[in-house]
């Protein structure tokens, strides 16, 4: 059962997030987490807020905690993959997608992320090879 006080903080966070007030949203989600550290949604939402600020390391950490708390919550994998791709950790992102696909094998968002990740990895690898041959 959700804690009403924590849910009220989450709702405030959702309002701030919708207004793109990411620091405010992070504060509200953090307050919710202080009240109830077992609710994966609070970590997922705070991860999205960190992503809104392009703070991909913090987004990644919250997404990992979200998945740890609820391995069946697909949005946690999506948030983690997004952060890993932004950090150009493509191998980890591919591994995360595959982990998420064990939960929901036909998830269109994760399948799209897998294709995108493989494309970005190939582009970076190709650019690195061109740079290495010039050196």
Image (spheres, grey):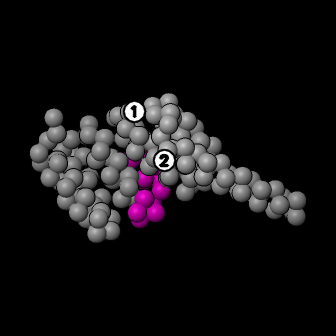
Residue at far top of view: 102
135 to the left or right of 61: right
Highlighted magenta segment, given as a residue range: 51-63
Which residue is denoted by mark 2 in the rendering?
109
Question: What residue is drawn where x is 38% and y is 55%?
Answer: 48
In the image, residue 83 lies at what x, y percent?
A: 50, 52
In the image, residue 36 lies at what x, y percent?
A: 21, 41
18 in relation to 91, above or below: below
Question: What residue is drawn where x is 29% and y is 65%?
Answer: 18
Residues packed near mark 2 inside 10 Å, few (<14), some (14 to 19) or many (20 plus): few
Residue at far left of view: 4
Residue situated in front as seen by the camera: 114 or 64: 114
Residue 80 makes an appearance in the image? no
Residue 6 makes an appearance in the image? yes
Residue situated in front as seen by the camera: 119 or 63: 119
The quadrant in which the N terminus is found is top left
Q: SS of the residue at dot 1?
A: loop
Question: What residue is drawn where x is 63% and y is 43%?
Answer: 91
- The mark lying in front, picked from 1 and 2, is 2
Residue situated in front as seen by the camera: 61 or 39: 39
In the image, residue 104 lies at what x, y percent?
A: 46, 34
The reply to whether the magenta stretch includes residue 106 is: no
In the image, residue 99 lies at what x, y percent?
A: 51, 34
Which residue is denoted by mark 1 in the rendering?
71
The reply to whether the magenta stretch includes residue 57 is: yes
């Amino acid at each position: 059962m959700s804690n009403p006080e924590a849910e009220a903080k989450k709702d405030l966070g959702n309002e701030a997030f919708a207004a793109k007030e990411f620091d405010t949203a992070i504060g509200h989600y953090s307050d919710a987490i202080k009240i109830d550290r077992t609710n994966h949604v609070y970590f997922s939402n705070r991860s999205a807020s960190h992503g809104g600020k392009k703070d991909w390391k913090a987004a990644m950490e919250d997404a990992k905690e979200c998945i740890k708390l609820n391995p069946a919550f697909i949005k946690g994998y999506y948030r983690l993959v997004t952060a890993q791709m932004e950090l150009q950790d493509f191998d980890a992102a591919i591994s995360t997608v595959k982990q998420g696909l064990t939960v929901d094998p036909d998830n269109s968002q994760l399948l799209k992320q897998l294709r995108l990740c493989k494309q970005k990895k190939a582009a970076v690898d190709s650019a690195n090879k061109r740079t290495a041959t010039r050196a």
